[in-house]
Amino acid sequence: MNEYKIKICGITNQIDALHAVDAGADALGFIFYKKSPRYVSPNVVKSIAANLPPFILPVGVFVNEEAKVVRNIVDECGLALAQIHGDETADFCESLGRPVMRGIRLQDRNTFLAMAEYKGRARVRGFVLDAFSQDLHGGTGKIADWELAKEAAHSFSFLLAGGL
């Protein structure tokens, strides 16, 4: 039996967070990438995360951020995971010393090779597969190649993102 988990990303306020939880979200994503239209400050996220029901996982989404900044925000906001979506290496993810979900833009089977670099690392708990975009790191709203995702499921644990 498959067990599905739902993460709603791009939460920017308490009302939306509670609506997402009421709709069945298991995790909420908060974007700390300042170029994103869904960017939210650590102070706002700290307040939202402190008022979430038990067992709802708050997740911070980062793109090419310094390790020290990621660690500080994860700790300050009480986040369960750091979702890393830029050009960060497997070693960078390990250096965080915090649980990580690695965002991957699913382009073709070569993507599996990139995923293999992260698999088995103690801090990398799984992946977030998003549609490939040359210009965006994630949040495209486009549907990923589900046939490739089905192939990836034989070897990797992941969440599907975008255009669902």
Image (spheres, helix red, strand yellow):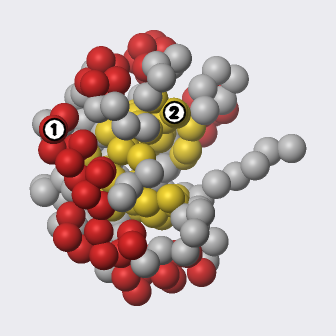
In the image, is 101 to the left or to the right of 53? left
Label located before the other in sequence (1 or 2): 1
Residue drawn 20% across the image and 48% down it: 72
Q: Which residue is drawn at 75% across and 49% down?
A: 3
The image shows residue 114, relative to residue 160, as above or below, that is above
Q: Where is residue 147 in the image (x, y as percent from the top left)?
A: 63, 33
Determine the secondary structure under disc 1: helix
Quadrant position of residue 118: top left
Residue ID for mark 2: 125
Report the disc number at residue 68: 1
- Identify the element where label 2 is drawn: strand
Position above or below: 48 against 152: below
Looking at the picture, does residue 35 appear above or below residue 117?
below
* Residue closer to the observer: 65 or 42: 42
Residue 52 visible within the image: yes
Q: Which residue lies furthest to the right in this view?
A: 1
Amino acid type assigned to the residue bearing label 1 in the image: Lys
Is 1 left or right of 65, judged from the image as shown?
right
Residue 22 horizontal/vertical position (percent):
59, 81
Q: Which amino acid does label 2 sit on?
A: Arg
Relative horizontal placement of residue 61, taking residue 146 as reference (left or right): left
Local packing at callout 2 (Cα closer than 10 Å; few below 14, some 14-19, many 20+) is some
Q: Between 41 and 160, which is closer to the camera in this rendering?
A: 41
Query: Which residue corresponds to the image point at 21% horizontal and 64% vertical from the top-left?
Result: 42
Give the Cα separation between the discs numbered 1 and 2. Answer: 20 Å
